[in-house]
Amino acid sequence: MHTAKLIIELTNDIIFKYAVIFCRVGSVLLLLPGLGETYVSARSRLALALMLSLVFYPLLESVIPSNPPSVEATVIYCFKEVTIGIFFGLLTRIIISTLHIAGMKISFMNGLSAATLFDTNQASQGSVIGVFLSLIAFTVFFTTGMHKIFFAGIYESYQVIPVNQPLPIEDFAYLSTQFMSEAFMMAFKIASPIIVIGLLLYVAAGLISRLMPSMQVFFVLAPVQISVSFFILMLCISTSMMVYLNFFEDKIISLFQ
């Protein structure tokens, strides 16, 4: 009887620790860019979360507390882990939204703001330029192995916010505000060449309309504006992607330190 009781307690403890790890890992993967998209089946995400939790279990077993005596305490543990995972996933989403914001700024300046495509990453309509930049970023993420930073970050998150620690609500609010402000600033930097050229074209169009009032300036300006903006984008896209990827890596690393 005593041996059977020990086996049952040990089994319950293993199941509890695995469930706690799965709550955080699964909620992060629910929102993780490239893996938490609508076009990725829920069954695939669930299988990946279960496998990752199994991989993390021997590494995190020592930092997970033993099975609490009450059901209420177990529910509280799971709720905290899901909340932490969703928070980290949302922060990565904010970083990814930088490209969508930059694409919208570029579209406004080159006259393509009305041209939209269904963006599978956001499950909504998005600018053509934003979708294009996002596809390039995701391609670079997976070809260069940067997606491994996410998995390392999930492991490091247990050092940043241990399981026994209360939810740092103030830190959540501060980091969300900081990430959003830096995402907007980085989007402006990525789109700044197009913005500068667009402003110069608008100034030139205003001068021409003053000199030749009968000329249909905006009718003539549209093809020039689109052609010049695409040319500038072609020249700057490699540098912009490198700047963005460095920004992305720095923010993810700083998030889990």
Image (cartoon, helix red, strand yellow):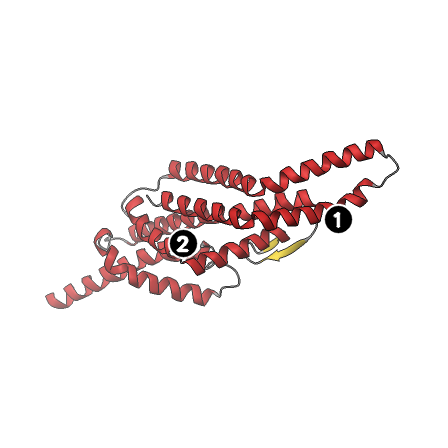
Place of residue 65 in the rendered image (x, y in percent of width and height, measured from the top left): 23, 51
- Report the side of 125 relative to 176 (left or right): right
The residue mark sitting in front, 2 or 1, is: 1
Q: Is residue 10 above or below residue 171?
A: below
Spatial distance from mark 2 to mark 1, Cα to Cα?
A: 44 Å
Residue lying at 77% horizontally and 43% vertically, measured from the top left: 221
Q: Nearer the viewer, residue 216 or 30?
A: 216
* Amino acid type, residue under disc 2 in the picture: Val
Dot 2 or dot 1: first in sequence order is 2
- Find residue 115 and report its horizontal and vertical position in percent: 69, 52
Secondary structure at badge 2 equals helix
**Residue in the foreground of this view, choosing between 3 and 103:** 103
Q: Residues within 10 Å of mark 2 (few under 14, many from 20)?
A: many
Disc 1 residue crowd, few under 14, some 14–19, many 20+, Cα 10 Å: few
Residue receiving disc 1: 223
Q: Residue furthest left?
A: 2
Specify the farthest residue to the right. Answer: 214
Residue at the image point whose x is 63% and y is 37% from the top: 196
| Residue closest to the eye, 100 or 191 | 191
Query: Is residue 58 shown left or right of residue 116?
Result: left
For badge 1, the amino acid type reads Pro
User: Which residue is labeled 2 in the image?
Assistant: 28
Quarter placement of the N terminus: bottom left
Q: Secondary structure at mark 1?
A: helix
- The answer to whether residue 113 of the structure is visible from this angle is no
Residue 173 relative to residue 5: left or right: right
